[in-house]
Amino acid sequence: NSDLLSRCRTDLTGQATNWKMSIDVLSDEYHTNGFVIVRGLFEADRLREITGEAERVVHDAASTAEHGRVYFDDEGDARAERAASAVRCVFRIQERSRYLRELLNSPQMTDLVRPLLGDDPVADGIQYIDKPPHASYEFPYHQDNAYMFYEPPRALVATVALDGQLADSGPIAFLRGSQALDVLPHQPSGVLGASRGLADPPDKATYPEMIVEMEAGDMLVHHANVIHRTGPNHTPRHRRNLGFVYHGAGATRDAEANARYEEELARNAVHDTA
């Protein structure tokens, strides 16, 4: 692990990457659509390191099965240990890995999200999300700020694809331009890993849906207010993501709304993901 950290620090000294040459284009797309894709941010060797570390942490998390931090596809299974391949979500995964903490706070990440936020980024954490082979569940339309509660809504999620994600694997689908909306009414979704969904169907005529396909190593950055969902995974392959969550230093979390939400979570025993 110390060798991984050493290579991580070495990588971060060289910032002459393609995305930096086109940050103005990325920023324009992000502010217009509510999301933007950074293609090939992590090359093959670096991605193998990140994926290997995520797999190590998820394996350890599966053995602890810490309620509220680790969720499995079959939460009714009472066995003390379950396979890492059955893990659906691990929240705040960086708390289990120095390597991932350094990546979360690295210039490679923060220099990219700063111009998108329009503010100095503050790292909130990393969430691991897996849609296993042939998973039939869907995460309903929602806005992340319905449980982040940042005002002004300068917050985003930078999702790194650990696997290739084509349309039939349940990738993220956005309603383009819907980040311009305030947070709409939400209600408990009943879906493990996605606690809230929109109370009413969204306006897809005004905000057309776009399904985002990614290759492993791509990063998808989306605004906290943009409406999005994910579909079922119809493939025999896992669809794994790491979601790096940031807010702007000038944004403030609504403490009262957050407290009410925590009470709702306790009643429904369901947690969130993008």
Image (spheres, helix red, strand yellow):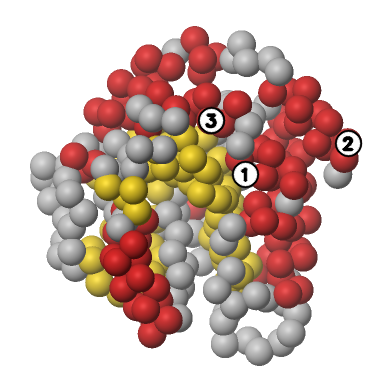
- Residue that carries the numbered disc 2 in the rendered image: 3
Left or right, 146 with reference to 161: left
Marks 2 and 1, Cα distance to the nearest angstrom? 21 Å
Nearer the observer, disc 3 or disc 2? 3
Residue at position x 61%, y 11% in the image: 16
Left or right, 108 with reference to 234: right
**Residue 179 in view of the camera:** yes
Residue at position x 76%, y 73% in the image: 63
Q: Mark 1, residues whose alpha carbon is within 10 Å: few (<14), some, or many (≥20)?
A: many
Which quadrant would the N terminus be assigned to in this image?
top right
Residue at position x 26%, y 43% in the image: 152
**Which residue is at the front of the view, 269 or 137?**
269
Which SS class for mark 1? loop
Which SS class for mark 3? helix
Q: Earlier in the sequence, mark 3 or mark 1?
A: 3
Nearer the observer, disc 2 or disc 1? 2
